[in-house]
Image (cartoon, rainbow, N blue to C red):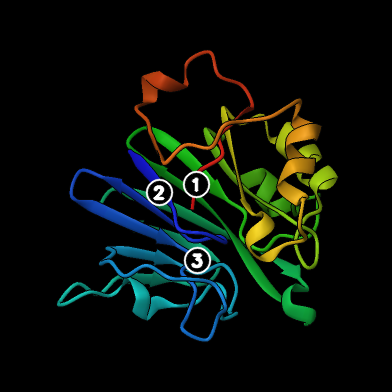
Amino acid sequence: MVITHYGGEFFKVTFGDTTLAFNPPSKDSKLKGAKFGADIAFVSANHPDFNGIDQVSHGEKKPFVISGPGEYEIREIFIKGFPLKTEYGGREMINTIYYVTLEGMTLLFLGALNQKELSHDAKAGIEEVNILFVPVGGDGVLDPEDAHELSVSLESNIVIPMHADDIGEKGSLENFLKEEGGKVSPVEKLTLKKKDLEGKMGEVVVLKS
């Protein structure tokens, strides 16, 4: 599995010949985009910073779009979406968090979450978390302290902060890293196999964008 960050909450996850896209920004967003073809596109909230499906459609490759709660099975990828309210962009909306199982690993993508307590249904439906994508930045998503508290409670092997200084409050990533215990050198991409998770607990990985 290879995880690449394009800024904001926009990630590409590739494994084999399958590509997933999470929260691609639309052309109406101030965030920069990246054009590639995805097999599955996840949209956590209906906001220009996250709903640019056209950005991950390329040539004849059109993604299967998941933009709300429910259970899905696509290409032996198992997905659970849980709805939580958020107030991103100054208005109340539904933010769907996605729990994705693939290649024997689990991803939990929190999207534009702004509450440090998950719903009862989400807690019941989420088991082991290997890779956690957590929003940091306040102003509609978790502030650094709450993001750290939630990350610890979920006991994931790896924590990937997102949102942060791109669209969040300046200095939020630095403050989150202080909460986590120190500086982390950013890397271009994260390449993982299941065996690489052994012995890791709450390891923070900052991806360049």
Residue farthest to the right? 145
Give the mark, 3 or 1, whose residue is nearer the N terminus.
Answer: 3
Question: Which residue, given by chain and number where applicable, does mark 1 sit on?
Answer: 208
Q: Position of residue 32 (x, y in %)?
A: 48, 71
Query: How far is the residue under mark 3 from the one under mark 1?
Result: 16 Å
Question: Callout 2: 10 Å neighbours few (<14), some, many (20+)?
Answer: some
Query: How far is the residue under mark 1 from the one under mark 2?
Result: 8 Å
Q: Is residue 181 above or below residue 53?
A: above
Q: Position of residue 103 (x, y in %)?
A: 32, 36
For residue 70, the mark is none
Q: Is residue 165 above or below residue 50?
A: above
Q: 176 and 57: which one is in front? A: 176
Give the mark, 1 or 2, whose residue is nearer the N terminus.
Answer: 2
Amino acid type, callout 3: Asn
Task: Name the residue rendered at 34%, 27% in the picture.
Answer: 193
Residue farthest to the top? 199
Task: Name the residue rendered at 42%, 34% in the picture.
Answer: 105
Question: Which residue, given by chain and number where applicable, does mark 3 sit on?
Answer: 23
Question: Callout 1: 10 Å neighbours few (<14), some, many (20+)?
Answer: few
Question: Which residue, given by chain and number where applicable, does mark 2 sit on?
Answer: 4
